[in-house]
């Protein structure tokens, strides 16, 4: 049984979601050819700490940094490193906060300089599929309705959804029940109840859906080396339509971020 959050808990999740959303935008301001992914992590960590929060990824099950920085064929869980971003790359940045005992968690895939047309479409489709999932996240629906909405949209463009990883509930723990798969059947899965806080996070491959785990035990790569994209937002299930807690507005409405 998944417990809905109280309005007091949702208020704390909302505070986390705003810090996370702004931290992603801070990262977006420095994404450019010539910048290392380690630099992106430092920017995020500084911003999170300056806002009184803790970067929850750092040390999570041994993860070594404040963000996941997943470049090109890395779907998720890439380690920030001295890799220098180059024109035409994409970098998926996933980050989390712990603030006042609650968690924030969101992700965005940034293009670096000019990306090719297929990659641009991959980014647009993955982000749009997230919003399709959010539309389906209403009280009375089920997690399978979210998965179906994401999967059917993604596959209509010839892309594929990664099935080994999924979204999740969020609260005092970063990962809570229910699991929120990005594929599924309508009317199946966990029942969605008003007040349930979940992270929806499509991971979409430009090619086939196969993935493999890096030897470092963390990074998930596409098997065919095609690019992959990942967008994540935190929402609260409500009657009629979900309430979005985190937002990409700080990224997409900032004139200093150029894409
Ligand atoms: Mg995340
Ligand atoms: Mg997540």
Image (cartoon, rainbow, N blue to C red):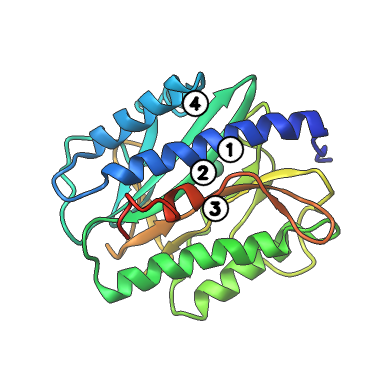
Report if the beta carbon of the residue with label 2 is closer than 8 angstroms to ligand 1.
yes
Q: Earlier in the sequence, mark 3 or mark 2?
A: 2
In the rendered image, which residue does mark 3 sit on? 201
Residue under the image location 24 percent in, 33 percent down: 39
In the rendered image, which residue does mark 4 sit on? 56
Residues packed near mark 3 inside 10 Å, few (<14), some (14 to 19) or many (20 plus): many
In the rendered image, which residue does mark 2 sit on? 106
Contact between marks 3 and 4 (CB within 8 A): the answer is no
The kind of secondary structure element at disc 3 is loop
Quarter of the image with the N terminus in it: top right
Q: Nearer the viewer, residue 145 or 135?
A: 135
Above/below status of 86 relative to 101 = below
Residues packed near mark 1 inside 10 Å, few (<14), some (14 to 19) or many (20 plus): many
Q: Earlier in the sequence, mark 1 or mark 2?
A: 1
The kind of secondary structure element at disc 1 is helix
Contact between marks 1 and 2 (CB within 8 A): the answer is yes
Q: Which of labels 3 and 2 is toward the front?
A: 2
Report if the beta carbon of the residue with label 3 is closer than 8 angstroms to ligand 2.
yes
The span from disc 4 to disc 1 (Cα, nearest Å) is 13 Å
In the rendered image, which residue does mark 1 sit on? 17
Residue under the image location 39 percent in, 57 percent down: 211
The span from disc 3 to disc 2 (Cα, nearest Å) is 8 Å
The kind of secondary structure element at disc 4 is loop
Residue under the image location 46 percent in, 70 percent down: 125
Classify residue 153 as left or right of residue 67: right
């Amino acid at each position: 049984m998944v417990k809905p959050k109280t309005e007091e808990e949702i208020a704390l999740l909302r505070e986390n979601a705003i810090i996370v959303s702004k931290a992603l935008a801070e990262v977006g301001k420095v994404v450019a050819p010539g910048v290392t992914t380690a630099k992106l992590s430092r920017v995020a960590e500084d911003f999170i700490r300056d806002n009184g929060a803790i970067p929850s990824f750092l040390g999570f099950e041994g993860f070594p940094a404040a963000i996941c920085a997943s470049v090109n064929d890395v779907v998720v869980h890439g380690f920030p490193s001295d890799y220098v971003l180059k024109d035409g790359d994409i970098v998926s940045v996933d980050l989390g906060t712990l603030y006042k005992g609650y968690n924030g968690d969101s992700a965005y895939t940034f293009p670096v300089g000019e990306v090719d047309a297929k990659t641009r479409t991959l980014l647009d489709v993955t982000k749009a599929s997230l919003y399709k999932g959010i539309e389906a996240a209403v009280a009375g629906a089920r997690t399978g309705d979210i998965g179906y909405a994401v999967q059917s949209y993604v596959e209509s463009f010839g892309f594929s959804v990664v099935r080994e990883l999924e979204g999740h509930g969020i609260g005092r723990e970063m990962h809570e029940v229910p699991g929120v798969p990005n594929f599924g059947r309508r009317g199946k899965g966990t029942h969605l109840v008003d007040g349930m806080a979940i992270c929806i996070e499509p991971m979409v491959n430009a090619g086939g859906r196969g993935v493999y785990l890096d030897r470092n035990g963390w990074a998930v790569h596409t098997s065919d080396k095609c690019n992959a994209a990942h967008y994540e937002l935190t929402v609260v299930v409500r009657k009629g339509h979900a309430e979005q807690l985190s937002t990409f507005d700080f990224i997409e409405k900032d004139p200093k971020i150029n894409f």
